[in-house]
Image (spheres, rainbow, N blue to C red):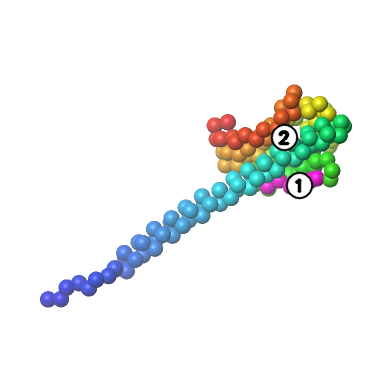
Amino acid sequence: MRGRSAGFTLLEMLVVLAIIAAASLLAMAAFGDGLRGARLHSAAKEVAAQLRFTRALAIASGVPQEFVIDPAARAWRAPKGRHGRLPDTGELVFTGARDLRPASAEGAVRFFPDGAATGGRVRMAANGGGWDVDVAWLTGEVRLRRIGATQ
């Protein structure tokens, strides 16, 4: 009587390949969300840095300075010719003073020579999370804060 030879059956090999394929698909989906989140975080840090630059310039020059954002175009402008674009994914909302609207779709934060500002918030969100860049109206302080699905 002959014994079974060592090895795997074709069915066992197909099951293992199906498990590997499913795990790869899950990993790719998680990685894609991770990249989107990283892009949002990077954009939020850039906006916060440009707001801080605008405030510092207002203090140093003694002249009010404005940071302008256009959520529809997903673009921003700062003093000294600085400008940039924001990621095309997710939600982008600006909340600020109504009387500081350079154009109908744009909003602005004005910084004054004493460091104060008109205040505002830039919210970048996707998949239930994201980032808020807050500007305090009294002090002009710029803060970056992570938001979650419950906020």
Residue 148 shows in this picture: yes
Q: In the rendering, which numbered label is found on residue 94?
A: 2
Cα–Cα span, label 2 and label 1: 16 Å
Tell me if residue 7 comes above or below residue 89 in the rendering.
below
Name the mark nearer the viewer: 2 or 1: 1
- The residue that appears at 80% across and 42% down in the rendered structure is 77
Quadrant where the N terminus sits is bottom left
Magenta highlight on residue 83: yes
- The residue that mark 1 highlights is 84
Q: Name the side, left or right, on which 102 lies relative to 72.
A: right
Q: Tell me the amino acid under the disc marked 1.
A: Gly
Left or right? Give the position of 8 relative to 125: left
Seen from this angle, which residue lies furthest front?
A: 60
Q: Is residue 62 left or right of residue 128?
A: right
Task: Give the extent of the magenta segment.
Answer: 82-87
Q: Is residue 104 visible?
A: no
| Residue 150 on image: x %, y % | 54, 32
Q: Earlier along the polypeptide chain: callout 2 or callout 1?
A: 1
Q: Label 1: state its secondary structure.
A: strand
The quadrant holding residue 71 is top right
Residue density around tag 2, few if under 14, some if 14–19, many if 20 or more, within 10 Å: some
Count of all numbered marks drawn on residues in the image: 2
Residue 102, compared with residue 89, is above or below; it is: above
Q: Amino acid at mark 2?
A: Phe
Where residue 144 sits: x, y (%)? 65, 35
- Residue 9 horizontal/vertical position (percent): 29, 68
